[in-house]
Image (cartoon, rainbow, N blue to C red):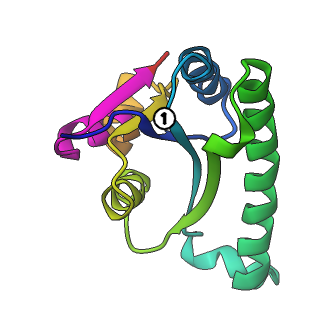
Amino acid sequence: MSDWKRIIIAIDDSQRSLNAVDYVGGIASHLEGIHLCLLHVFPKPPPNHFSNGISPEQYAENQIQQSAQLFAQAEKILHDHGVSPQVISTRSVIATDQSISEAILALQEQEAFDTIVVGKRGITKAEEFLFGSISNALIHNGRDIAVWVIG
């Protein structure tokens, strides 16, 4: 039997992402046996990105620093709800040869998380058609997991 209390919260720099953290914090503070993994997946840079003198290592370091700032914001929200720091872990991952949703699902599968929480992105129907939606991809490609999309 799966344990829905092992939760990945995929975060980015959007307000809706922080809303998702806030939502989970309100629930998690009242539960025993909860484990929350804050996950920031950053995209592989476009091919011409390094022509401006930034090395791949510098790109990764910049993204990890951004992740640390996002984690600090999210952890503060969780702590304000009374969630213990001992039940929170963080991961920063680059989506090299996969989409962001595939990177989220890979971690979910590797570490046996049973719930994924994402904030709904504020994209238009045209953008969703052209680029896809992370939440839709998680819902359609996730197997035997719960996916919470928080608006």
Query: In the displayed structure, does residue 64 sit left or right of residue 37?
Result: right
Which residue type carries mark 1?
Gly
In the picture of the structure, the residue carrying the numbered disc 1 is 33
- Judging depth in this view, the residue of 84 and 15 nearest the camera is 84
In the picture, residue 20 is in which quadrant? top right
| Direction front: furthest residue | 32
Q: Is residue 117 magenta?
A: no
Residue at position x 41%, y 34% from top?
5
Residue 18 picture location, percent across and down: 66, 26
Check disc 1 and report its element: helix, strand or loop: loop
Where are the magenta residues, as a range? 135-149
Q: Can residue 133 be seen from the camera position used here?
A: no
Residue 111 picture location, percent across and down: 39, 60
- Judging depth in this view, the residue of 27 and 14 nearest the camera is 27
In the picture, residue 84 is in which quadrant? top right
Q: Quadrant of the N terminus?
A: top left
Residue at position x 36%, y 37% from top?
115
Relative height, residue 65 to residue 34 (above, below):
below
Residue at position x 60%, y 40% from top?
11
